[in-house]
Amino acid sequence: MSESTAGADRSITVDTLEVGACFSERRHITEADIAAFAALVGDQGRHHMPGAERIMAHGLLTASLATKVGGRLDFIARRMDWEFLRPVWAGDTIEAKVTVRSLGEARSGVAVEFDLVIENQHGEPVLRGESTGVIRH
């Protein structure tokens, strides 16, 4: 099984992708990240805003870290399924681990299924999920 860490790894292409390959991205979540996301999507729930005892990151902000891996692979998602397990707070560092579960043929390219887990700095899973889609030729 190969593993790639944060940063663009253009040596991985659809032709070299293999089942079991694991890719990861890491991000430190700041109050500014949460505020910017709240402004972008309009979710201004009090638990996401300054003044809360602890500022909680939006679930989709957390989930979006896995899409960074998809962008590196030029993956076009058709389905995403997330299970949110624990909150992510301002000041947490999270890491998305994206593993290729299957590869197959699709009319427009290569069909791909991913297993996903995002963990906090304590190694605790905060999100589990899966995604299916295609990498176009």
Image (cartoon, grey):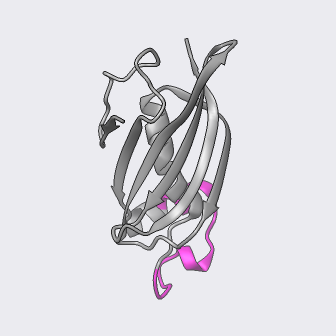
Residue 48 painted magenta? yes
Using the rendered image of the protein, determine whether residue 39 is visible from the camera's viewpoint. Answer: no
Q: Is residue 96 above or below residue 136?
A: below
Q: Residue, x 34% and y 71% (percent of image)?
A: 122
Q: Is residue 47 above or below residue 101?
A: below
Q: Position of residue 36 (x, y in %)?
A: 48, 59
Q: Residue, x 55% and y 39% (percent of image)?
A: 114
Q: Position of residue 30 (x, y in %)?
A: 37, 66
Q: Position of residue 41 (x, y in %)?
A: 61, 56
Q: Residue, x 57% and y 69% (percent of image)?
A: 85
| Residue 69 as seen in the image, left or right of residue 48 | left
The N terminus - image quarter: top left
Q: Position of residue 75 (x, y in %)?
A: 54, 29
Using the rendered image of the protein, determine whether residue 22 is visible from the camera's viewpoint. Answer: yes
Q: Residue, x 43% and y 52% (percent of image)?
A: 96
The C terminus - image quarter: top right
The count of marks equals 0
Query: Which residue range is magenta in the image?
Result: 36-54
Residue 72 painted magenta? no
Q: Nearer the viewer, residue 87 or 12?
A: 12
Q: Is residue 19 above or below residue 79?
A: above
Which residue ends up furthest to the bottom in the rendered image? 53
